[in-house]
Each structure stands twice: as C-alpha cells, then as structure tokens.
Amino acid sequence: MTRRRRRAFRGSSPLERLAILVVLAVVAGVTAGLLLPQVSVTVGKATGEYTATGSAADTLATLAVVDDRKPSSTYQRDAFGFREYDPDGNGCDSRNDTLARDLKNVTYANAERCKVESGTLDDPYTGKTISFKRGQTTSAAVQIDHVVALNNAWKSGADSWDTRKRYEFSNDPYNLLAVDGPANVEKGDADASVWLPPNTSYDCAYVARQIGVKAKYGLSVTSAEKEAMLKTLADCPGQAVPES
C-alpha cells in the first residue's frame, strides 16, 4: 500500500476500512490462485516429485525423445493389417484371441473355438464389469485397444517399418487389451500426456505397458509424453515393465 493510500486508509471510517481490507484479500486470493499451479509444477520438478523407480522408469529413460517428428508418409491404418496376421498360428484372429484371453466364462460360437460368443470382462480402463455378447449391436461394448495406438506408433517411427513389422506390432498380444468400448473410443490415438484410464488405479500398469511396447519396437516418445509417464510412475515406486 502506497503512502497516499495509507493516509486515505487512516482517514476512512471503520466500515470503509473493512471494505478495503476485504477487497485486498480477494485480490490476493485471485493472484495466488493464478500463480500457485505454475509454481507447483516448477517446484515439483525441482524437488524430484516426478522421480520414479523400477524397471518401467529405467526403461523410459532409454527411449528416444523426439518432438514434432514428421512422418515420411500419411498414416494408413490398413498398413498395419490388424486381424490379418496370426502370430501364434492357432488359426484365430487377434480380436478373438484377445477376447479369449481377457474375458472370463468364455463361450464360443464355433467348434474351432475361434469366435468368442460371450463372456465377462473386468475392464481395466473403467473398473466396470461388462457382459459381452457377440452381435451386430452388442459386440462394440468390448473393443480391442492397441495400448500404443497405431497412429501414435506411426508418428513415433512405424512409418519407416516394412509391412511384416507393422503386422507383427498390430497383432502383438503384448500391445492388445480387451477394454470398455466407449473408453477406447474416448482414448482414440492419444498418448499418455493426453489420456489415461478413468480407473486411476490402473494408470501405473497402463503407462508401464506403453513403455514396454515402445521399448520393444524402438518407438520414440515426446517430451510431454515422457513427463506424463514419469509423473504417473512417481506414484508407484518399483513399477515393473510387464513381461507378457
């Protein structure tokens, strides 16, 4: 408060002084509200808030960080051949293999046990229990998510792969999860800096798997993506990269 304002303050009535103090308190509160989020991020980094331990954090440290990478060509989902390659040679496509692995109480629509008819999913992304039933209007309730999305992979290095490697990546069980359909749609091709599962108890496992996939296939991360992953892993000391 300046000298002139102090004089005016002393010469005012008790009610006027109270009103002035209230206004000053409001202004101070608004200013603090604007500055604290920025300060907390800066202090968090400086004090090691985002320091993480475990093989997931160690593996993250080995990934190349590349911002604003320009793919050599336009993304084409068909170039990955999802469900067109059978990595385990059992004659079943990747969607049905993943449903059979991730659902409980599975029934099949054919004798070859390659078409999952029904089952129950304990969805990792939302924490909900979902009853799956094959059908034109019901199958989408459970979708197969590429943990590292195909478009994200394209931007992170897959644009330079040959067809075989893209097919292997797209159909690799390590990168596939049966999940809630709407949650999968909401995720789209987002990386960890934009989207994490609504079920926050799964965030660490989700990020660890993304790191494992990117390490397995030599894909890069962006600065924002790496920071988001590190921030997540800081909440789960010792988080390991999934083995399978």
Image: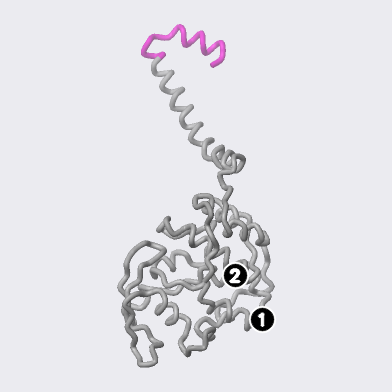
Residue under label 2, please give it.
153
Which residue position is annotated with label 1?
162
Real-space Cα separation, disc 1 to disc 2, in angstroms: 13 Å
Judging depth in this view, the residue of 111 and 68 nearest the camera is 111
Look at 42% across and 56% down and name the residue there: 201
Residue 127, above or below 87: above
Considering the numbered disc 1 on the image, is that residue within a helix, a strand or a loop?
loop
* Mark 2: secondary structure: helix
Assess whether mark 2 and mark 1 are in contact (beta carbons under 8 angstroms): no
Q: Position of residue 148 (x, y in %)?
A: 54, 68
What amino acid does circle 2 point to? Ala
Q: Residue at x 50, y 32 (%)?
A: 32
In the picture as drawn, the residue positioned furthest to the bottom comes out as 111
Judge whether 186 appears above or below 48 on screen. below
Question: What span is colored magenta in the figure?
Answer: 1-17
Q: Nearer the viewer, residue 114 or 73?
A: 114
